[in-house]
Image: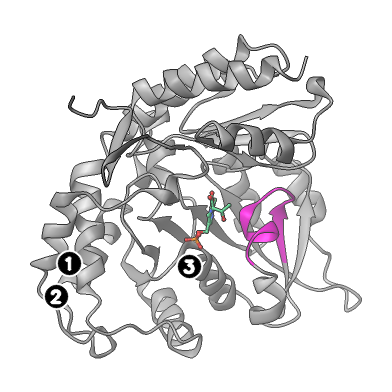
Amino acid sequence: MAPTNKEIVHGEIPMKKVIDLRSDTLTKPTPGMRKAMMEAEVGDDVFGEDPTVNALQEKVAKLLKKEEALFVCSGTMANQLAIRAHTQHGDEVIIESEAHTFNYEGGGGSALSGVQFHPLRGERGVLDPLQIEEAIRPPDHHFAPTRLVCLENTHNRAGGRVYPIARIKETYHVAKRHGLATHLDGARLLNASLASGIPPDTYAQYFDSVSMCLSKGLGAPIGSLITGSREFIDRVHRFRKMFGGGMRQVGIIAAAGIYALDHHTDRLRVDHANAKRLAQGLSQIDGVEIDPNSVETNIVVFDVSQTGTDPDRIAGCLKQQGVLMLSFGKTLIRAVTHLDVTSQDIDRALEITAEVFSGFK
Ligand code: TLP
Protein backbone atom coordinates (compact mmCIF):
# COMPACT_ATOMS: atom_id res chain seq x y z
CA MET A 1 0.00 0.00 0.00
CA ALA A 2 1.27 3.53 -0.76
CA PRO A 3 2.53 5.41 2.28
CA THR A 4 -0.04 7.82 3.73
CA ASN A 5 0.65 11.41 4.60
CA LYS A 6 1.52 10.22 8.10
CA GLU A 7 4.17 7.84 6.93
CA ILE A 8 7.51 8.00 5.21
CA VAL A 9 9.22 5.06 3.67
CA HIS A 10 12.56 4.33 5.24
CA GLY A 11 14.11 1.43 3.35
CA GLU A 12 11.50 -1.33 3.36
CA ILE A 13 9.86 -0.34 6.64
CA PRO A 14 7.08 2.28 6.63
CA MET A 15 7.64 4.57 9.63
CA LYS A 16 5.34 7.10 11.26
CA LYS A 17 6.27 10.67 10.37
CA VAL A 18 7.81 12.48 13.31
CA ILE A 19 5.89 15.72 13.88
CA ASP A 20 8.58 18.21 14.73
CA LEU A 21 7.18 21.29 16.45
CA ARG A 22 10.36 22.31 18.28
CA SER A 23 11.01 25.32 16.05
CA ASP A 24 10.26 26.87 12.68
CA THR A 25 14.02 26.75 12.09
CA LEU A 26 13.74 23.01 11.36
CA THR A 27 12.28 23.22 7.87
CA LYS A 28 14.09 21.56 4.98
CA PRO A 29 14.53 23.46 1.68
CA THR A 30 11.76 22.59 -0.78
CA PRO A 31 12.58 21.24 -4.27
CA GLY A 32 11.80 24.67 -5.79
CA MET A 33 14.13 26.35 -3.32
CA ARG A 34 16.90 23.83 -4.00
CA LYS A 35 16.53 24.47 -7.73
CA ALA A 36 16.80 28.23 -7.20
CA MET A 37 19.94 27.62 -5.13
CA MET A 38 21.46 25.40 -7.75
CA GLU A 39 20.85 27.92 -10.51
CA ALA A 40 21.97 31.00 -8.53
CA GLU A 41 24.44 33.35 -10.15
CA VAL A 42 27.29 33.90 -7.74
CA GLY A 43 30.37 36.06 -7.19
CA ASP A 44 32.63 36.98 -4.30
CA ASP A 45 30.45 38.89 -1.85
CA VAL A 46 33.42 40.24 0.11
CA PHE A 47 34.17 42.10 -3.13
CA GLY A 48 30.47 43.05 -3.31
CA GLU A 49 30.24 41.02 -6.53
CA ASP A 50 27.59 38.44 -5.79
CA PRO A 51 24.57 39.47 -7.86
CA THR A 52 22.17 37.22 -5.96
CA VAL A 53 23.23 38.60 -2.58
CA ASN A 54 22.93 42.13 -3.95
CA ALA A 55 19.44 41.37 -5.27
CA LEU A 56 18.37 39.95 -1.89
CA GLN A 57 19.75 42.95 -0.01
CA GLU A 58 17.96 45.36 -2.35
CA LYS A 59 14.73 43.40 -2.05
CA VAL A 60 14.74 43.49 1.75
CA ALA A 61 15.82 47.14 1.93
CA LYS A 62 12.87 47.94 -0.33
CA LEU A 63 10.48 45.77 1.70
CA LEU A 64 11.38 47.63 4.90
CA LYS A 65 11.88 51.00 3.16
CA LYS A 66 15.39 51.35 4.54
CA GLU A 67 18.37 52.72 2.63
CA GLU A 68 20.35 49.50 2.80
CA ALA A 69 20.33 45.89 3.96
CA LEU A 70 23.18 43.51 4.65
CA PHE A 71 23.05 39.71 4.46
CA VAL A 72 24.42 37.88 7.51
CA CYS A 73 24.47 34.26 8.55
CA SER A 74 22.05 34.34 11.51
CA GLY A 75 19.55 36.31 13.54
CA THR A 76 22.02 36.33 16.40
CA MET A 77 24.71 37.87 14.21
CA ALA A 78 22.25 40.49 12.92
CA ASN A 79 21.23 41.54 16.44
CA GLN A 80 24.77 41.52 17.77
CA LEU A 81 26.09 43.55 14.84
CA ALA A 82 23.32 46.09 15.39
CA ILE A 83 24.31 46.45 19.04
CA ARG A 84 27.98 46.75 18.08
CA ALA A 85 27.27 49.42 15.48
CA HIS A 86 24.90 51.47 17.66
CA THR A 87 26.98 51.52 20.84
CA GLN A 88 30.40 51.96 22.38
CA HIS A 89 31.89 49.82 25.14
CA GLY A 90 30.44 50.80 28.51
CA ASP A 91 27.05 51.87 27.11
CA GLU A 92 23.74 50.55 28.37
CA VAL A 93 21.02 48.91 26.29
CA ILE A 94 17.39 48.82 27.44
CA ILE A 95 15.69 45.53 26.59
CA GLU A 96 12.72 43.45 27.70
CA SER A 97 13.79 40.78 30.19
CA GLU A 98 12.47 37.82 28.11
CA ALA A 99 14.02 39.04 24.84
CA HIS A 100 16.02 36.65 22.69
CA THR A 101 18.93 39.11 22.38
CA PHE A 102 19.25 39.25 26.16
CA ASN A 103 18.70 35.56 26.95
CA TYR A 104 19.78 33.41 24.04
CA GLU A 105 22.67 35.05 22.25
CA GLY A 106 25.50 33.66 24.32
CA GLY A 107 26.18 36.85 26.27
CA GLY A 108 27.12 38.51 22.97
CA GLY A 109 26.17 42.03 24.10
CA SER A 110 28.80 42.09 26.82
CA ALA A 111 31.38 39.89 25.08
CA LEU A 112 31.34 41.48 21.63
CA SER A 113 30.16 45.04 22.26
CA GLY A 114 31.08 45.60 25.91
CA VAL A 115 27.59 46.86 26.73
CA GLN A 116 25.52 46.19 29.78
CA PHE A 117 21.89 45.33 29.36
CA HIS A 118 19.21 47.01 31.44
CA PRO A 119 16.48 44.38 31.30
CA LEU A 120 12.93 45.55 32.09
CA ARG A 121 10.11 43.17 32.89
CA GLY A 122 7.41 43.46 30.26
CA GLU A 123 3.79 42.40 30.18
CA ARG A 124 3.93 39.32 27.91
CA GLY A 125 6.98 40.74 26.16
CA VAL A 126 5.66 44.27 25.81
CA LEU A 127 7.16 47.27 27.64
CA ASP A 128 5.34 50.36 28.79
CA PRO A 129 7.09 53.36 27.16
CA LEU A 130 6.94 55.16 30.54
CA GLN A 131 8.87 52.28 32.08
CA ILE A 132 11.50 52.78 29.37
CA GLU A 133 11.64 56.51 30.01
CA GLU A 134 12.17 55.94 33.74
CA ALA A 135 15.01 53.51 33.02
CA ILE A 136 17.02 55.99 30.95
CA ARG A 137 20.10 57.03 32.94
CA PRO A 138 20.52 60.68 33.83
CA PRO A 139 23.70 62.39 32.62
CA ASP A 140 25.88 61.54 35.62
CA HIS A 141 29.30 59.92 35.41
CA HIS A 142 28.24 57.21 37.86
CA PHE A 143 26.05 55.68 35.19
CA ALA A 144 26.57 53.78 31.99
CA PRO A 145 25.04 56.04 29.32
CA THR A 146 21.83 54.63 27.88
CA ARG A 147 22.29 54.41 24.12
CA LEU A 148 19.88 51.92 22.61
CA VAL A 149 16.41 50.42 23.06
CA CYS A 150 15.76 46.92 21.62
CA LEU A 151 12.31 45.45 21.02
CA GLU A 152 11.27 42.04 19.60
CA ASN A 153 8.41 41.45 17.13
CA THR A 154 6.98 38.85 17.18
CA HIS A 155 8.03 38.12 20.71
CA ASN A 156 9.27 34.55 20.95
CA ARG A 157 8.98 33.83 24.68
CA ALA A 158 5.66 35.67 24.84
CA GLY A 159 4.27 32.99 22.50
CA GLY A 160 4.76 34.76 19.17
CA ARG A 161 2.95 37.88 20.35
CA VAL A 162 2.64 40.74 17.90
CA TYR A 163 4.12 43.88 19.48
CA PRO A 164 1.32 46.49 19.46
CA ILE A 165 2.13 49.25 16.97
CA ALA A 166 0.93 52.00 19.34
CA ARG A 167 3.50 50.88 21.91
CA ILE A 168 6.22 50.79 19.27
CA LYS A 169 5.37 54.32 18.17
CA GLU A 170 5.37 55.68 21.73
CA THR A 171 8.65 53.88 22.45
CA TYR A 172 10.17 55.49 19.38
CA HIS A 173 9.12 58.96 20.56
CA VAL A 174 10.53 58.35 24.05
CA ALA A 175 13.81 57.10 22.56
CA LYS A 176 14.15 60.02 20.18
CA ARG A 177 13.33 62.58 22.90
CA HIS A 178 16.34 61.20 24.77
CA GLY A 179 18.65 60.80 21.75
CA LEU A 180 18.57 56.97 21.84
CA ALA A 181 18.81 54.59 18.90
CA THR A 182 16.14 51.90 18.40
CA HIS A 183 16.66 48.35 17.14
CA LEU A 184 14.03 45.76 16.29
CA ASP A 185 14.73 42.05 16.52
CA GLY A 186 12.36 41.25 13.69
CA ALA A 187 13.38 37.61 13.36
CA ARG A 188 9.67 36.92 12.68
CA LEU A 189 8.62 40.38 11.49
CA LEU A 190 6.72 38.97 8.50
CA ASN A 191 4.67 36.79 10.84
CA ALA A 192 3.80 39.94 12.82
CA SER A 193 2.95 41.79 9.66
CA LEU A 194 0.73 39.06 8.30
CA ALA A 195 -1.13 38.65 11.60
CA SER A 196 -1.69 42.37 12.18
CA GLY A 197 -2.15 43.47 8.57
CA ILE A 198 0.43 46.20 9.26
CA PRO A 199 3.04 46.38 6.46
CA PRO A 200 6.61 45.54 7.52
CA ASP A 201 7.86 49.03 6.59
CA THR A 202 5.28 50.61 8.91
CA TYR A 203 6.92 48.73 11.77
CA ALA A 204 10.40 49.42 10.44
CA GLN A 205 9.97 53.21 10.30
CA TYR A 206 10.15 53.36 14.10
CA PHE A 207 13.55 51.67 14.26
CA ASP A 208 17.01 52.81 13.23
CA SER A 209 17.81 49.18 12.51
CA VAL A 210 15.73 46.08 11.90
CA SER A 211 16.93 42.49 11.71
CA MET A 212 14.86 39.88 9.88
CA CYS A 213 15.37 36.12 9.51
CA LEU A 214 14.88 34.00 6.40
CA SER A 215 15.57 30.74 8.20
CA LYS A 216 12.51 30.69 10.48
CA GLY A 217 8.93 30.61 9.19
CA LEU A 218 10.09 31.55 5.69
CA GLY A 219 11.85 28.20 5.37
CA ALA A 220 15.31 29.13 4.07
CA PRO A 221 18.19 27.01 5.38
CA ILE A 222 20.24 29.99 6.58
CA GLY A 223 20.37 33.74 6.56
CA SER A 224 19.20 36.99 8.09
CA LEU A 225 19.32 40.62 7.06
CA ILE A 226 20.08 43.74 8.94
CA THR A 227 18.64 46.95 7.59
CA GLY A 228 19.12 50.65 8.30
CA SER A 229 20.58 53.86 6.92
CA ARG A 230 23.49 53.74 4.45
CA GLU A 231 25.84 55.11 7.10
CA PHE A 232 24.69 52.57 9.70
CA ILE A 233 25.00 49.61 7.31
CA ASP A 234 28.47 50.79 6.38
CA ARG A 235 29.45 50.49 10.07
CA VAL A 236 27.73 47.10 10.32
CA HIS A 237 29.63 45.94 7.24
CA ARG A 238 32.95 46.70 8.90
CA PHE A 239 31.97 44.83 12.06
CA ARG A 240 30.63 41.89 10.04
CA LYS A 241 34.13 41.54 8.59
CA MET A 242 35.65 41.90 12.05
CA PHE A 243 33.38 39.16 13.46
CA GLY A 244 34.39 36.86 10.61
CA GLY A 245 31.03 37.09 8.89
CA GLY A 246 32.22 38.07 5.42
CA MET A 247 31.10 35.29 3.08
CA ARG A 248 32.13 34.55 -0.49
CA GLN A 249 29.99 32.89 -3.23
CA VAL A 250 27.05 33.12 -0.92
CA GLY A 251 24.46 33.78 -3.59
CA ILE A 252 23.86 30.07 -3.36
CA ILE A 253 22.09 30.66 -0.04
CA ALA A 254 20.84 34.17 -0.81
CA ALA A 255 18.88 32.51 -3.66
CA ALA A 256 17.05 30.44 -1.05
CA GLY A 257 16.19 33.68 0.76
CA ILE A 258 14.79 35.31 -2.36
CA TYR A 259 12.79 32.18 -3.11
CA ALA A 260 11.50 32.14 0.48
CA LEU A 261 10.35 35.76 0.33
CA ASP A 262 8.64 35.20 -3.03
CA HIS A 263 6.96 31.89 -2.23
CA HIS A 264 6.63 31.49 1.51
CA THR A 265 5.47 34.85 2.85
CA ASP A 266 1.73 34.55 2.20
CA ARG A 267 1.64 30.94 3.33
CA LEU A 268 2.62 32.01 6.85
CA ARG A 269 -1.15 32.33 7.31
CA VAL A 270 -1.28 28.50 7.12
CA ASP A 271 1.18 28.28 10.01
CA HIS A 272 -0.87 30.79 11.99
CA ALA A 273 -4.07 28.81 11.38
CA ASN A 274 -2.30 25.59 12.40
CA ALA A 275 -1.00 27.21 15.58
CA LYS A 276 -4.51 28.37 16.46
CA ARG A 277 -5.87 24.89 15.76
CA LEU A 278 -3.18 23.41 18.00
CA ALA A 279 -3.89 25.91 20.80
CA GLN A 280 -7.62 25.25 20.60
CA GLY A 281 -7.05 21.50 20.81
CA LEU A 282 -4.54 21.83 23.63
CA SER A 283 -6.95 23.98 25.66
CA GLN A 284 -9.32 20.96 25.73
CA ILE A 285 -6.70 18.67 27.28
CA ASP A 286 -6.69 18.19 31.07
CA GLY A 287 -3.45 19.47 32.56
CA VAL A 288 -2.78 22.01 29.80
CA GLU A 289 -3.29 25.70 30.42
CA ILE A 290 -3.50 27.97 27.41
CA ASP A 291 -5.75 30.72 26.15
CA PRO A 292 -6.11 30.07 22.40
CA ASN A 293 -7.01 33.74 21.93
CA SER A 294 -3.48 34.64 22.96
CA VAL A 295 -2.04 32.78 19.96
CA GLU A 296 -1.56 35.35 17.22
CA THR A 297 1.11 33.82 14.99
CA ASN A 298 2.98 30.49 14.73
CA ILE A 299 4.21 29.99 18.30
CA VAL A 300 2.19 28.18 20.97
CA VAL A 301 3.45 28.29 24.54
CA PHE A 302 1.44 26.36 27.14
CA ASP A 303 1.66 25.80 30.87
CA VAL A 304 1.79 22.27 32.28
CA SER A 305 2.09 23.06 36.01
CA GLN A 306 -1.32 21.44 36.69
CA THR A 307 0.20 18.06 35.87
CA GLY A 308 2.85 18.50 38.58
CA THR A 309 5.25 17.04 36.01
CA ASP A 310 8.46 18.53 34.72
CA PRO A 311 8.10 19.87 31.13
CA ASP A 312 11.31 18.03 30.17
CA ARG A 313 9.71 14.75 31.18
CA ILE A 314 6.51 15.55 29.29
CA ALA A 315 8.53 16.51 26.19
CA GLY A 316 10.38 13.19 26.55
CA CYS A 317 7.10 11.23 26.63
CA LEU A 318 5.77 13.12 23.61
CA LYS A 319 9.00 12.39 21.78
CA GLN A 320 8.60 8.66 22.37
CA GLN A 321 5.25 8.93 20.57
CA GLY A 322 6.73 10.90 17.65
CA VAL A 323 5.80 14.47 18.61
CA LEU A 324 8.63 16.87 19.29
CA MET A 325 8.09 20.01 21.37
CA LEU A 326 10.49 22.12 23.44
CA SER A 327 10.52 22.39 27.18
CA PHE A 328 10.52 26.17 27.62
CA GLY A 329 11.22 26.89 31.28
CA LYS A 330 10.06 25.49 34.60
CA THR A 331 6.40 24.98 33.69
CA LEU A 332 6.16 25.75 29.98
CA ILE A 333 6.30 23.86 26.70
CA ARG A 334 6.64 25.50 23.26
CA ALA A 335 5.33 24.23 19.93
CA VAL A 336 5.97 26.10 16.68
CA THR A 337 4.17 25.52 13.38
CA HIS A 338 5.98 25.79 10.05
CA LEU A 339 6.28 24.83 6.40
CA ASP A 340 6.81 21.12 7.08
CA VAL A 341 3.74 20.70 9.29
CA THR A 342 0.23 20.13 7.90
CA SER A 343 -3.16 20.53 9.59
CA GLN A 344 -3.38 16.70 9.63
CA ASP A 345 -0.09 16.65 11.53
CA ILE A 346 -1.59 19.05 14.05
CA ASP A 347 -4.61 16.79 14.55
CA ARG A 348 -2.33 13.79 15.01
CA ALA A 349 -0.09 15.75 17.42
CA LEU A 350 -3.21 16.65 19.43
CA GLU A 351 -4.35 13.01 19.61
CA ILE A 352 -0.91 11.96 20.83
CA THR A 353 -0.66 14.84 23.31
CA ALA A 354 -4.08 14.01 24.77
CA GLU A 355 -2.99 10.38 25.17
CA VAL A 356 0.28 11.34 26.84
CA PHE A 357 -1.40 13.81 29.21
CA SER A 358 -3.98 11.23 30.25
CA GLY A 359 -1.04 9.43 31.89
CA PHE A 360 -0.29 12.45 34.10
CA LYS A 361 -3.68 12.72 35.84
N1 TLP B 1 15.26 31.54 18.04
C1 TLP B 1 15.37 30.10 18.10
C2 TLP B 1 16.08 29.68 19.39
O1 TLP B 1 17.28 30.37 19.53
C3 TLP B 1 15.26 29.87 20.63
C4 TLP B 1 13.99 29.49 18.06
O2 TLP B 1 13.93 28.27 17.87
O3 TLP B 1 13.01 30.21 18.21
N2 TLP B 1 15.57 36.50 17.54
C5 TLP B 1 14.53 35.71 17.82
C6 TLP B 1 13.25 36.33 18.26
C7 TLP B 1 14.65 34.33 17.71
O4 TLP B 1 13.60 33.57 18.01
C8 TLP B 1 15.87 33.77 17.27
C9 TLP B 1 16.05 32.28 17.16
C10 TLP B 1 16.93 34.64 16.98
C11 TLP B 1 16.74 36.01 17.13
C12 TLP B 1 18.28 34.14 16.57
O5 TLP B 1 18.29 33.60 15.29
P1 TLP B 1 19.43 32.57 14.84
O6 TLP B 1 19.03 31.25 15.43
O7 TLP B 1 19.36 32.61 13.36
O8 TLP B 1 20.71 33.07 15.37
Residue 85 point in image, percent of width and height:
54, 77
Q: Is residue 143 left or right of residue 74?
A: right
Residue 335 point in image, percent of width and height:
54, 34
Query: Is residue 166 placed above or below 39 in the rendered structure?
Result: above
N-terminal of the two: label 3 or label 1? 1
Q: Which residue is mark 2?
A: 51
The alpha-carbon separation of the residues under discs 3 and 1 comes to: 18 Å
The residue type indicated by label 3 comes to: Ala
The residue under the point 52% across, 74% down is 81
Q: Specify few, some or many for label 2: CA neighbours under 10 Å numbering under 14, 14-19, or 20 or more.
A: many
Q: Is residue 29 left or right of residue 338?
A: left
Q: Is residue 160 visible?
A: no
Q: Specify few, some or many for label 1: CA neighbours under 10 Å numbering under 14, 14-19, or 20 or more.
A: some
Q: Which residue is mark 3?
A: 78
Q: Are marks 3 and 1 in contact (CB under 8 Å)?
A: no
Asked whether mark 3 and ligand 1 are closer than 8 Å, the reply comes as: yes
The extreme top residue here reads: 284
The residue under the point 46% across, 26% down is 275
Dot label at residue 55: 1
- First to last magenta residue range: 93-105
